[in-house]
Image: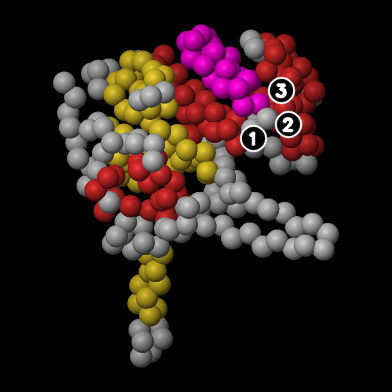
Amino acid sequence: MIHDLVTQAEAMFIFKDIMKTEYFQKLRKGYYEASQKCLLNVHRNYLTLLTFINEIYEYDKQHAKHFVSRFRGSSKDWRNCEATFSEIIVYRHYIRSNYEGIIKKIHLDEPESDIIIERLDGNKAYLEVLCVMPELKFSTQGKSVVNDLGTHQQNELSSIRQKILHKVNKQKQFSAQRENYAVIELNDPRIASEFTVLSSLSRGYNINFNSETGDKTGEGYNWEASLFDDPKTAFIKAIIYFYMGDYQSRKFVFNPKFHYIKQA
């Protein structure tokens, strides 16, 4: 059954050559292994990638060729290919919205933003997509490695907050006065939780106790000195985040200090 699904999807796939690349072959192998162990992620796997690229091709041939070209150019770079897959997941979601008349058009303009959604009234949403995966080191014989996942922290370079600030400070993203969105895919089960995002965007999760009795008096995220207190983030309307390909279930953290400039 699994073999038949793969064979059928590959027969219908438009871009035959990239199925032979290292990245696609790894995904193919992973699909079989995960299926046999009942661990398949239905939102993000080899078959969904083939299907999504075909759907994008039916919607806009040049956009599909753009994504495929990126796979060809970095077929041995796992992290870059995973980032491209993230953008495909986000892009493909809005195709149905276009067909249903909810949005007007999907644009690709790399210097501007990863994905641009044009609404019916002509206003646009600019989506910058980040695929977040921890860089893990593995223990070998005679050498143990302890990994410290800093994704949920505030000052670690691997944290959600610092990744967004890197986009702002180094890549000059989110600097235009318009509706900018940072779209984050948490692409690893070890960090795929709400805590990862909210803890990093805020000052962290605090639990307060009465110093005399030791009783807990309250708990929650501390939004003092949050990411949004940085003036350079004033043009980020919201952070959108989703887990391991499931963009349909995405969540939003809106910037209370967003500086809105209505487009003409």
Residue pictured at 74% horizontal, 63% vertical? 144
Which label's residue is closer to the chain start, 2 or 3? 3
**Residue 197 as seen in the image, left or right of residue 172:** right
Residue 242 numbered mark, or none? none
Which residue position holds label 2?
26
Q: Secondary structure at mark 3?
A: loop
Task: State which quarter of the image contains the C terminus.
Answer: top left
Range of the magenta residues? 50-75
Q: Report, in whole angstroms, how far the alpha carbon at label 2 lies from the one at label 3.
A: 9 Å
Which residue position holds label 3?
21
Q: Residues within 10 Å of mark 1 (few under 14, many from 20)?
A: some
Considering only vertical position in the picture, is 194 above or below 39? below
Q: In the current view of this chain or complex, which residue is farthest to the front?
A: 170
Q: Secondary structure at mark 1?
A: helix
Q: In the current view of this chain or complex, which residue is farthest to the right?
A: 141
Amino acid under label 1?
Trp
Q: In the current view of this chain or complex, which residue is farthest to the bottom?
A: 212
Residue 78 numbered mark, or none? 1
Q: Are marks 2 and 1 in contact (CB under 8 Å)?
A: yes
**Residue 106 as seen in the image, left or right of residue 236:** right
Q: Nearer the viewer, residue 11 or 67?
A: 67
Can residue 128 be seen at all in this image of the molecule?
yes
Residue pictured at 44% horizontal, 46% vertical? 163
Which label's residue is closer to the chain start, 1 or 3? 3
**Residue 116 position by quadrant:** top left
